[in-house]
Amino acid sequence: MEPAWILWGALVACVVAALLPWANAEAAIVGATLLLPREALPLLVLGAAAAQVTAKSAVYGLARWAPDRMPARARATLARVHTLARRRSALTVTVLASSALGVPPFYLVALACGAAAAPLGAFVAAAFAGMVLRYGVLAGAVALAWGGL
């Protein structure tokens, strides 16, 4: 199969996984890493991170629009998240940890950041850095385990 099609397939899978929390982007990264030539791995990692962050930014935007339309109990819960959004360093660390490690779940962090009107630039920068780290380690480990870099 043509490497360009493998790469595009992995990127589409990453977008889908960003929008549907039960889908798994890591499986697409592992599969693409096994099929792509080693010199394409940096493009895979950067493209997958960009695809994930772009789609998660849509989740962020939806959550930013939604709080006024939520029940009062849900709005009260979101009020507690606003304290995190006001503390920029805590926000950055939380988004970075979530996007790199998956703890807390990144889907929920994107929703919370949007609902709390956290700065989009800080969200995108921390999310991209975390995703590059996450996918870089994953692709590197798979490539090393199956044939070396």
Image (cartoon, rainbow, N blue to C red):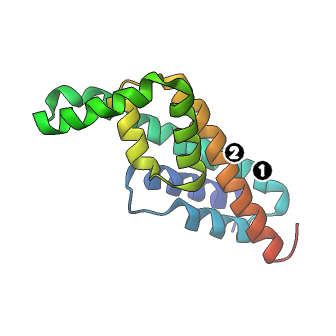
101 horizontally vs 147: left or right: left
Crowding near the residue tagged with mark 1, few <14, some 14–19, many ≥20 C-alpha atoms within 10 Å: some
- Residue 141 location, x and y as percent? 76, 67
- Residue 41 location, x and y as percent? 77, 56
Q: Is residue 76 above or below residue 51?
A: above
- Of the 4 image quadrants, the one containing the N terminus is bottom right
Q: Is residue 70 above or below residue 133?
A: above
User: At 79% across and 69% down in the image, what residue appears?
Assistant: 143
User: At 73% across and 58% down in the image, what residue appears?
Assistant: 137
User: At 32% across and 28% down in the image, what residue appears?
Assistant: 64
Q: Is residue 71 visible in this depiction of the protein? A: no
- Of the 4 image quadrants, the one containing the C terminus is bottom right
Residue behind mark 1: 42
For mark 2, give the secondary structure. helix
34 horizontally vs 97: left or right: right
Q: Residue furthest right?
A: 149
